Amino acid sequence: MKTTIYHALTAVALTMLCSCNDYLDTTPSKGDNEVLNNSEQVEALFNNSDIFTAKAVMTVPESDDIGLTTDMFDAMGYAGENYLNGLSYDISGIENNVYGDPIWENEYNKVFTANLIMNNVEEVTDLTDAKRTEYLAQAHFLRAMAMWNLVNTYCEPYAEANLQKPGLPLKTSTSYEESLSRASLKDTYDFILADLTEALKTNCADVDKRWWVSKPAVEAMLARFYLFTQNYKSAAEYAAQALQSSATTLQDFNELSFSPSPLVSPDGVADTVKYSGLYSLSPNEMTVYPENYYSQYFNVESGLYLIPSESLIALYDHDNDLRYQQFFNRNALWEASISGFGDNIIYHKFHHYLNGDEIQSGPTVPEMLLTEAEVLARQGEWQSAMTYVNKLREARILKGAADINLTATSQQEAVTQILDERHREMPFVMRWFDIRRLAYNETTYDDVTVKRTFYAVANNVANTSVKYIYTLPVKSKRYAQPIVNSEITRSSGQIVQNDYDDTDVQKTAVTTDENQ
Amino acid sequence: MAKKRNLKIMAIRLCVALMLLMASSSVVLAQKSLDDRVNVSLKSVSIKTFFDEMNRQTGLNFICNADELKSLPKVSVNERSATVRDVLDQVFGQMGCSYTVQGSIVTVSRHASAQKSRTVYGYVKDDEGEPLPGVPVKVKGTDLQTITDANGYYRLKVPAGECQIEYSYIGMESQTLKLAKGGSDQNRSIRLTSDNTLNEVVVTGYQTISKERATGAYTIIDKDDLSKRHAQNLAQALDGLVAGMQGNDNGRGGKNFTIRGTSTMNADNTPLVVVDGFPVTDNPSSGADTNPNLNALERLNPDDIESITFLKDAAAASIWGARSANGVIVITTKKAKKDQNWSVEASTQVSVGEKQSVSHLTNHATSAQMINYERWCFENGMLGSQYAGSMSSLYSALTQSQLLMYKGYSMGTITKDAMNTQLAQLASINNASQIKKYMLKTPVVSQTQGSISGSVGDWTTRASLMYQYDTGDFIGSRGNLWNIDWNNNYKLNKYISVTVALNLVNSDKHSSQIGISDLANLSPYEMLLNDDGSYAQNFHSSYNSDVLSQFNWSGFTYNNMNYNLLQEARHRRERISNTQMRTQLGLEFRIIDGLKFNSKFQYESSRYTRKDVNDEESFYTRYAVNYYTSGDGQGNALGASAVPAGAIVVNGKGSGHSALFRNDFTFDKVLAEKHAISAVVGNEISNYYLKSHTNPYLYGVTASSAGTVGATGYVNTMDGSTSTISGVPVTGKQYVMQSWNHNRFVSFYGNVSYMYDERYGLSASARSDASNLVTSKPKYRWSPLWSVGAMWNMANEKWMKEQTAVNRLTFRLTYGKNGNAASQSSARTTINTNASSIDESTGYYPGTIYDYGNPTLRWEKTAITNVGIDFSLLDNHIYGSLDYYNKKSTDVLGTVSIASVNGTSSATFNNAELSNRGFEASLGASADMGDFTLSGTLTYAYNKNKVTKLYTEMTNVSDMLNSYYIPGYPMNSIFTFEYAGMDKGIPCVYDTDGNKISINDFSLWYMDYHKVLHYQGTYVSPHTAGLNLDLRWKSLSLTAYLNGRFGGKMLMPTFAYNYVDNFGGKVNVSAQVADLMDANGKVITGLTDNMPLPTVDGDGNAIQLNQYTAWALFRRSLDIRVEDASYIYLSEIDLNYSLPANLFSGRWIKSVDLYGKMENIGLLWSANSKHYHPDYLPGSYQPVMTFTLGASIKF
């Protein structure tokens, strides 16, 4: 009897030891917590708009398009730290922001998702060759888009002289052990180009779901990439290819209606404010907007009102330019409880009913027309360049207006005209990226020096007793936004801060007389 | 508490084994010694001296009648190397005496006396039916005595006259047998029952050892401690009895316990519960797994409990391995005893409590105060944006008085006079009496139970049944609970015994879906019923009642959209039923003496159903049906509703099962008298599975229709927009919500303890666990857990035996590592594809990253050092224990900051560390004064915890104010600003340099927290104490229970500084407005212990609305809000009376007890200025005074 028991027990113990690991490999729970292993999961991740929506925090107020004056600020009583730091090109305030940096976090989160799919795609059980190609192309494209936004925000612009300057940490896996050191700017651009080249292997010949990769979307991004790296020949080729897309078309603004909304000013004056027809689009309608090759939007943080500067307003033909009539909403500042400033204009184009204002960030047909125009003009074909600009203007200027078509008599005039049109078409964030680019390209007549008057800002708070004229000189190192210090600490010093000096932002105190 | 301890069955076995050894060795000694050679040289000594000398040389004991002893002549003997037998024959022969040898006992008697005698013989057994060797059997008043042999058999010559025979044995209750006059021999077998007063036994769940041999820190609660309290559930009965164990209300009448502080951040922090050697499934208390199943303690009937051992340190708990870091509660249930007569017990009790206090529940200002405050807001511009949140929005809820003021002040649709008249009318109303009458109930709980136990041959059985009915204290609430327990043991043969146990619990809880927050949403002037008994109109908390009333409801399914809370409570109900079953099967093989093999199997299953019914009389249903009607947004219907008329019913279900298989060898033996060894080695494998789902909502449920599920996709709604219908599963899914959990564990364990001469003890244990929760990398999967311990029973030293002041003095020392499973983390990145709604940008169900992955996921480990002393002094009149512990938890899963380049700025890694240090004392004393006995036990515990390592950037002021875990500080710390009073009409705080900073200065939030924040202590009191005092007079006893907490901090309730707005929900005004505004509505100025309401700033300008916002933000973060949370609470007084036994002598009834008790009597002392109980501040439920009467009877 005893022997039998011993034998039985030994057998049980041995069996258990051997099969332990199999026994313990059961998934602990389902539904909310599964390892990536099927295509449904991959596609669900791609179908999450978080993967294609981008943040624009500091990049909005940095260009010359924002016109928040000290008077307006007084009336508002308060503005978020990102608004203040962007307006004042503050460095230490951003560095010390203990609340983190949404652009950096959001874009690297996309890089994680892209890497997760690239690393795990072979574990997907229902993988086919077509799916593999598609998932990898999509992942590479997502990563390229994220890295593009990052490199234009935190690094100095692409230029021969800058190539060995700090670029970005190049993450290719989901491991926490991977190096976080910043690669050179050259390596970073090469990394993005390599991703776009991989993305071009997509099977999707024309734009379908606009938040997925497609050949025209990659071509359009390549056109943008080459424009910003001054490879005009390649930019022209890819822009032309992208413009072949039949699924992507220009929206004639003459066909847009208005979306009126009754508003009351803080002083009790009532008015009906005419918002753009685009303003009332649902999130899904924004995603399928026909001008988009890839529907990425920059989400403008709430409280970061797109108050246009006088110079931006002056750029438009107020009577005939439908972009002015549609997007520059008179008296709509009342919504922010601000009034008493001229026409109380605020810029609204797209608007997500939960997230607020949005600015297109993915490549679009107008961008491709303007890119084609600019690169042709810069390569000397400035007359044919104007046809691309005018094709866009047909969809933008009131039908029957006298001067729909722009003309130029010299290369410089053509380029200037095209850049102005580009500015009108893509203000704020693309304008900021363009200011950076134009400072480093082969011409100087297009350089922009940004100047504004605003309060002193320190510790993320405005000091309303001191006013400065802020001047951002051409090629300022402050073109690159600082990385928050907490990120540098958390990387154990692997990430290094950008190099800044006193000349990057010039501050001139405004005298009391001017103050009044 | 240390006084009355249970002698466990296992302990008896141990003693038996021990005595068997001793007895058998004595027999061997005696037989040998009769032929042994001795040298005896005595000259004219008393017989006593001869006995002593022989005893010294041979170990033989001599028994002789005292009278005979005196009459015997002196002894002279001189023998060298003679056998014992020869010596005895010679001496007794000379005296004319005969002698008999039995074991080591030599009984001497005189031939001459030739007294008439007879023989009594038989067995002495314990209450389990096991033979008891070495029991002295004695004729009272004489020296006639013997002891039982190895088989418990005895044989004793006794006088033929009437006599009493006494059987006494350590750890057993003595018994006396009366023998009538007579000459014939008699067979009398005796059963001794264990005596609880002397021996303490530690049940660790895998073995039972006497407390004398336990190196670890334990607290033991036995059935007497429990039965005295007559608690409705076990958690209530245990609260305050165990030093170092804190209980917090779990929201359903029970408690969640923590032992010796919290040693984890993200893993489970509840102690492991072991019932009769099996870890039982507890109810996940948080997260997605929350379900209405009863937790382990709630499933036990307090009356079924034999004893509970709390394992607090590493030596105690490490054997339970990876789930023991939070302590282990080992429960032994009552079992029948072998050869026991059938016994039946029954008891019944009823408890009646007070109604909840309306003002405490709602914490509302009076109607007049509320209106005064709202009016002040209106008059001073402290009004939310008038123009932005349009009054015409359905989703801008208001109070009735605010609506009147909007009409009077802002919109001018009524005159100021009309407004004032109506406001004055509202100010005169108070709805508290109606709430008390219609919404609150007098809670009554009745409980009846019975049990039967007995044995038939080798089969013992005990069955119990408990039924509890609870009326609840809120409208619509009531509950039933059935608890059935059946325990069987069958001794197959000498080697094998089988245990089969079954426990079945069924509970049924009803409630209205209305709760305390709904009550708080009712303004103090809103009546439930009109004078004519019809439902009054109440203002809804989420919808603008004025806008609702302007809809043209005639075109909708329901024409009456009046909202009334009482009607809601009467027509919305929830029923949760659950059934939980536990079966245990145990096999015990006695292989050889001391070595046993145990095989145990446990299967548990649980099932619950949840049913929410919303009648069409409820606003909830009327609104839902009308809402899914296409409308023009102006109050007119354009079509029919997408859902049918009728009730809305939501059903949910959950079920789970678990299996556990445990095999071990145990070895218990005392070798060569002085070496006691106890060891166990075994393996356990378990599997837990739990799933739950919510069915699609059923619309249009009527008497004739079971209802239908809503259509998928978007439908038009009454406000002119589109929406999906609530409770419709996403395409392709069967249920609205579904989840399952599957956990598996495999463990190997071993433990050995060694005791030398009942003086020095050593223990060691080792265990390794693995689970499917943790990574697939074996390096991280297995947990190496172990412990070592040592002890010294100083009182057992020979040199201590002399004195009588110290009855017991034991020093204990243990060190070891326990573990905790990390179920909240995953080694690999995991994806959630179970989104409840589509992504509005893409139109598809989105996937999200659920866990970024913790590649080095492993077990959390807690190393515990414990030093303890147990003592008992002055004839056991004073007793207690002291323990000091140091718990260091490492590899704790903590949410740490990482570089966001990794994809996320925070991740949960095993690299946090926590420490818990503490001291526990338990001190008891008892004194007899005639018929009076006064006894008491004081427990005291001190715990200091600290987050010793957690990589997170805490330079951020708002993190410091809101985080539970802050490196370098105790968990749950309070940080505040130092209030600097008002400056230019704005409250200010000081920085560390003494500068005043306005609370409107946004830079405060960006400052280094060291400059502005001050550590104030913790919400959790470090010192806890419990005291119970017991006064007995004959069979009447009175027991009082007190508990106290000291050294913690609390935030006093403050006014919300809310401005009146029409955004979002309806906002009432809290009672604390009275601190800031007098009865006439005038702002009180000159306050120093409070932020006053804003009047004008330093320049004489009115304070702007956006400035007042900061008042609300800072109100809970100022040092003036912090007070000492210490208190002493009288929680219970019990009165027990046992009817005199002679009332039913000769009848079936053994005893009858009557009892009464009062619970939640109140605070005896509190340190805070308002005399609040810090755990039950205004705006919450509070325990109400409850009276209980009951009786129990034993047959």
Image (tube, coloured by chain):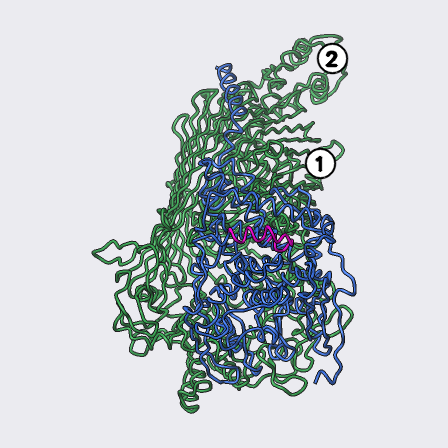
Chain colours: A blue, B green
- The reply, left or right, for residue B1104 in relation to residue A455 is left
User: Along the line of sight, which residue is nearer the eye, A476 or B71?
Assistant: A476
Question: Distance of mark 2 from mark 1, alpha carbons?
Answer: 41 Å
User: Along the line of sight, which residue is nearer the eye, A271 or B43?
Assistant: A271
- The reply, left or right, for residue B753 in relation to residue B445 is right
Query: Of tags 2 and 1, which is closer to the observer?
Result: 1
Q: SS at mark 1?
A: helix
Q: Is residue B277 visible?
A: yes
Residue beneath disc 2: B77
Residue B759 counted in the magenta span: no
On screen, B760 above or below B695?
above
Q: What chain is tagged by disc 1?
A: B
**Which percent across, then down, holds residue B404?**
42, 83
Residue beneath disc 1: B795
On screen, B632 above or below B953?
below
**Which percent across, then down, holds residue A174?**
60, 43
Magenta-drawn segment: A225-241
Amino acid identity at mark 1: Ala
Q: Are marks 2 and 1 in contact (CB under 8 Å)?
A: no
Quadrant of the snapshot with the C terminus of chain B? top left
Q: Is residue B1139 visible?
A: no
Residue A226 counted in the magenta span: yes
Quadrant assignment, res B26: top right
Amino acid identity at mark 2: Val
Q: Main secondary structure of the magenta part?
A: helix
Quadrant assignment, res A81: bottom right
Q: SS at mark 2?
A: strand
On screen, A126 above or below B1005?
above
**Mark closest to the chain's N terminus, 2 or 1:** 2
